[in-house]
Amino acid sequence: MNEVAVGVQEGARWREQVRRRWLLIALALLVILSTSPVVGHHIVGAVDWLPPALEHVGSLCMVSLHLLLAPVHSAFHWLLGIGLAVAIADRARARFRSASVLRSASAALGSPSAPFQAAAANVGLEVGQLRILRESPIPAFTAGWLRPRVYVAEDLADRLSNTELAAVLLHEKVHADRRDPLRLSALRFLSMTAFWIPALRRVADDLADEAEIDADSVAARRFPLELASALVTLAGGPSPRQHSRHLVEFQPYDLLERRVKRLTGDAVVVRSRISMGSLAAAGIVLVLAWASGVMVLHPLPDGAQGGAPPHCLEHTTGPLGHVFCKGGALQWKDLRCPHRA
């Protein structure tokens, strides 16, 4: 490989590392920003930097805003509770599906055949971590949270060459060594918990793609072209009826194309699932969450819970009718409305 090609690949790897860092930062920010205004003040206690004496900020009536946004804050509590229940149910369902697939695929209890043993020894994968499946809908995958194991279809040794088989096992070994099943399950749990922020799930999906790219990068140090060839062979498959649906679910076409191109040294255009629409929706939701979370910190004066704020005597149409008070000013003391008699 010439120096120009090497430089191009090094530049691509650097951009991928920067992309992963930004995705992790985005994930952390979305999780913190979406949950802290909902539960933060319940954990640390109310603060006194919004005293009852602060009746207005400019012309904005603070009591009206409290009355209007308190139901919004309560709605986020419900959403968070529903999200936790949905995330727990989703992870339980995933565990059940995984166990069901392994049972239906009937794991071979005997020792792997000679090609599998040779390929495992070639990449340093312990035979005890390797499980051979009969009639597996997925050619190769890694499963298990605390003690991940590599599962491969029994016919893989017939469909791939020895080096291609070793490349696939090395790729899966990277997933097992990094406990990617546990990490990706945690990402899925977080994205489902805050399901009302679509961008969070898309960030988690992008990070799941990056886990595949990371494993490819390690395997490509020894078997770049062999791994690319194995991916193409397994994606085509001799029995599309058996494999196509699962390959679409576990290996989206755009990710497969990206993996093959980068392994063969071709230019790659990385497409993110994060759209401007999802970012705009996340921004709106976060503004509502924080605005409602801040306003519930403002204590209501006595008698304000039942209707119009008592300090605005001329407003009797409810909180929505007096969000803005005439001639309001920034009041840090117990001042009356400028229009009040």
Image: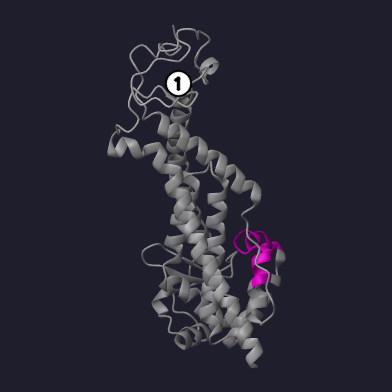
**Mark 1: which amino acid?**
Leu
| Residue 245 higher or lower than 226, as above or below | above
**Residue 240's quadrant in the figure?**
bottom right
Q: Is residue 120 left or right of residue 251?
A: left
- Per the image, the residue denoted by label 1 is 67
- Helix or strand or loop: what does disc 1 sit on? helix
Q: Nearer the viewer, residue 19 or 324?
A: 324
Q: Residue at x 47, y 34 (%)?
A: 291
Magenta residues (range): 241-258
Magenta region includes residue 61 = no
Magenta region includes residue 250 = yes
Question: Magenta region, mostly helix, strand or loop?
Answer: helix
| Residue 88 higher or lower than 178, as above or below | above
Q: Residue at x 28, y 39 (%)?
A: 44
Query: How far across and how far down the image is residue 200, in percent?
Result: 53, 50
Query: How far across and how far down the image is residue 85, in percent?
Result: 44, 40
Total marks drawn? 1
Residue 12 in view of the camera: yes
Question: Mark 1 Cα within 10 Å, few/some/many (few <14, many 20+)?
Answer: many
Q: Residue at x 62, y 58 (%)?
A: 249
Query: How far across and how far down the image is residue 146, in percent?
Result: 36, 64
Quarter of the image with the N terminus in it: bottom right
